């Protein structure tokens, strides 16, 4: 499967940046083709490139049409959805407060993922996402 992962930053070694790095590595180990996309590139983008993960700074630059968009952050997910009509997406919520974590609403978002129960509550109670569309997948660590 070809996966386009979006994130608002691949710059510093912070939460979602490292989540994307670890997710990309895990997907590649399982035989998937991964491209990472962010408009802010830096240290984590360099790490991904060293791991042979293509990194782009805008969805339209993606060298392949993805089978799925694994979206982090509202603006970045919507940009990928616009660039690839017909491609389904998963939207991941990592936080209760940041505006970037406001879930995008789009008919091709098949599932919403919350990394904890607080994020699930944001999606369902604050943003009105149907609870049947939300899964909780707790944050992970690659030991």
Image (cartoon, grey):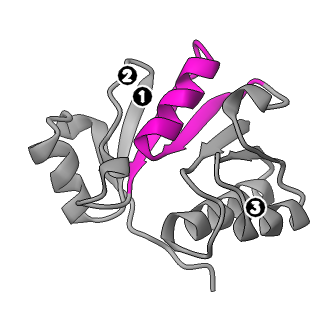
Q: Mark 3 points at which residue?
A: 45
Mark 1 or 2, closer to the camera: 2
C-alpha distance separating marks 3 and 1:
25 Å
Q: Give the label on residue 43, or none.
A: none
In what element is the residue under mark 3? helix
123 vs 16, left or right, is left
Relative height, residue 31 to residue 76 (above, below): below
Residue at 29% in and 65% down: 116
State the residue in front, 2 or 50: 50
**Which segment is the magenta one?**
65-93
C-alpha distance separating marks 2 and 3:
27 Å
In what element is the residue under mark 2? loop
Residue at 41% in and 29% down: 110
- Residue 115 on the magenta span: no
Residue 105, picture quadrant: top left
Q: Residue furthest toward the left?
A: 125
Residue at 51% in and 64% down: 16
In what element is the residue under mark 1? strand
- Locate the N terminus and report the quarter of the image it occupies: top right
Q: Name the residue under label 2.
A: 106
Mark 3 or 1, closer to the camera: 3
């Amino acid at each position: 499967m070809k996966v386009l992962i979006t994130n608002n930053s691949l710059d510093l070694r912070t939460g979602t940046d490292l989540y994307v790095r670890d997710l990309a590595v895990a997907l590649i180990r399982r035989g998937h083709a991964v491209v990472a996309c962010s408009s802010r590139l830096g240290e984590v983008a360099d790490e991904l490139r060293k791991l042979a993960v293509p990194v782009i700074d805008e969805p339209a630059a993606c060298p392949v049409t993805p089978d799925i968009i694994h979206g982090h952050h509202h603006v970045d997910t919507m940009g990928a959805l616009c660039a690839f009509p017909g491609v389904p997406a998963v939207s991941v919520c990592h936080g209760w407060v940041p505006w970037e974590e406001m879930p995008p609403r789009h008919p091709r978002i098949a599932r919403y993922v919350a990394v904890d129960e607080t994020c699930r509550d944001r999606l369902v109670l604050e943003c009105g996402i149907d609870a049947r569309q939300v899964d909780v997948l707790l944050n992970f660590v690659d030991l």
